[in-house]
Image (cartoon, rainbow, N blue to C red):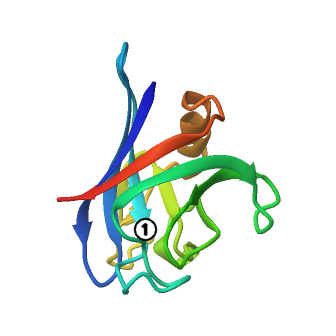
Amino acid sequence: MKKVTLIRTVSDKDKCLGVLIVTDDKTGVEFVCRTLELPWKENAQSISCFSPGKYVCKYTMSQSFKIKTYEVTGVPNRAGIRIHSANYVSQLRGCIALGDSHKDINGDGITDVTASVNTVAKFEKTMNYEDFELHIIEI
């Protein structure tokens, strides 16, 4: 059984950064990447990250992106939260972007994620496009 944990490590007025780790009971760590989310703004739709907790993620068709992505379900008072590619926090509306590393790509002083498209593809393949439970914790 694969376990997916997102550890939020940095949260400020501009963004929320973290590390996403996929582990398997038998094989150990299978995948690690960096995450980028909107800052905490009281769980407000489209402008905030969402509360730490456990959520079921399902590989479903996104009406916005017109492709299948992982949807984070069961978030109180929220809908349409996706795990998808994005490099900049300005590209997010409450979703989780995955990347290879944290870096200020565009020089605006806000940390971004790199190689997002490739990182999301690797994550989806690691998960075999199957549903999973996402554990989000803050440190």
Q: Residue furthest top?
A: 26
Quadrant in which the N terminus appears: top left
Above or below, 95 against 126 in this view is: below
Q: Secondary structure at mark 1?
A: strand
- Give the residue displayed 54% in from the left and 62% down from the top: 74
Res 43 → quadrant: bottom left
Q: Please, what is the three-letter code of the amino acid marked with disc 1?
A: Glu
Q: Is residue 60 left or right of residue 95?
A: right
Give x and y (percent) for residue 20.
37, 45
Q: Residue furthest left?
A: 139
- Give the residue displayed 43% in from the left and 58% down from the top: 113
Res 36 → quadrant: bottom left
Visible residue check, residue 85: no
Name the residue nearer the viewer: 117 or 12: 12
Name the residue nearer the viewer: 76 or 42: 76
Q: Is residue 27 left or right of residue 92?
A: left
Q: Residues within 10 Å of mark 1 (few under 14, many from 20)?
A: many
Q: Is residue 113 left or right of residue 80?
A: left
- Give the residue displayed 47% in from the left and 54% down from the top: 55
Q: How many marks?
A: 1
Above or below, 95 against 20 in this view is: below
Give x and y (percent) for residue 130.
63, 34
Quadrant in which the C terminus appears: bottom left
Above or below, 98 against 87 in this view is: above
- Give the residue displayed 52% in from the left and 74% down from the top: 94
Visible residue check, residue 79: yes
Q: Which residue is mark 1?
A: 37
Name the residue nearer the viewer: 88 or 38: 38
Give x and y (percent) for residue 86.
56, 62
Above or below, 17 against 31 in this view is: below
Give x and y (percent) for residue 27.
37, 14
